[in-house]
Image: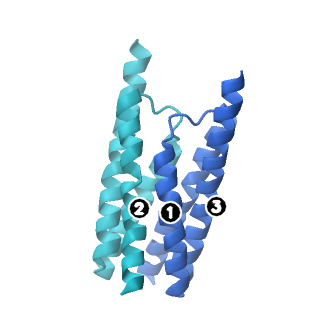
Chain colours: A blue, B cyan
Amino acid sequence: MLWSIMGTIAAICTTVGFIPQIVRGVKTRELKDVSPMMLTLLLIGGSLWLVYGIHLKNPIIALANGFTLSFVIALLLLRILFKRTNAKT
Amino acid sequence: MLWSIMGTIAAICTTVGFIPQIVRGVKTRELKDVSPMMLTLLLIGGSLWLVYGIHLKNPIIALANGFTLSFVIALLLLRILFKRTNAKT
């Protein structure tokens, strides 16, 4: 029981961890220091984890990676958007 | 077997994903757009995942998170270092 709680807290931390990155990006409108290669690898890894979690019928793995994936996609899109917007100004 | 390979590739992607971020940071000597709160949450989450993986005797979870943790610690230290160095110049 204690271990399940620990696993859940671990999953929550590594998932919601991307929210402050999105907030920071939206505030500063700058994400150029964030590596696009990192985001791409997290996108591929997160997608595979999601499929793997669904296959294992493990809701923690599936849910955590589903959310992580959506945050990483948001960061990638924001990075592209800011790069274009900042290039114009 | 196929699913284990998929899980392993997923773990490798979400772990080595932090390497290009370290490389980018070292090259540009700038990590100010990278959220310190994200790194802190990934540090806490990665530590808990590592302990959870050791408890489950699951080498994939333990190893992947052990590496992720060391990369996240490296990023946190680099971010502090660059912030100090760049503040001086």
Q: Residue at x 37, y 41 (%)?
A: B22
Looking at the rendered structure, the secondary structure element under dot 3 is helix
Going by the numbered disc 2, the residue's amino acid type is Cys
Going by the numbered disc 3, the residue's amino acid type is Ser
In this rendering, the answer to whether A80 lies above or below A4 is: above
State the mark number for residue A70: 3
For label 1, the crowd category at 10 Å Cα-Cα, with few meaning under 14, some 14 to 19 and many 20 or more, is some
Going by the numbered disc 1, the residue's amino acid type is Ile
Which quarter of the image is occupied by the C terminus of chain B? top left
Quarter of image, res A24 = top right
**Mark 1 = which residue?**
A44
Q: Are marks 3 and 1 on the same chain?
A: yes
Q: What chain letter is assigned to the residue under label 1?
A: A
Residue A31 percent across, percent down from the top left: 58, 37
Label 3, label 1: how many angstroms apart (C-alpha)?
12 Å
Pointers 2 and 1 in contact (CB under 8 A)? yes
**Mark 2 = which residue?**
B13
In this rendering, the answer to whether A72 lies above or below B62 is: above
| Whether residue A41 is visible | yes
Label 2, label 1: how many angstroms apart (C-alpha)?
7 Å
In this rendering, the answer to whether A62 lies above or below B16 is: below
Q: Residue at x 50, y 68 (%)?
A: A11
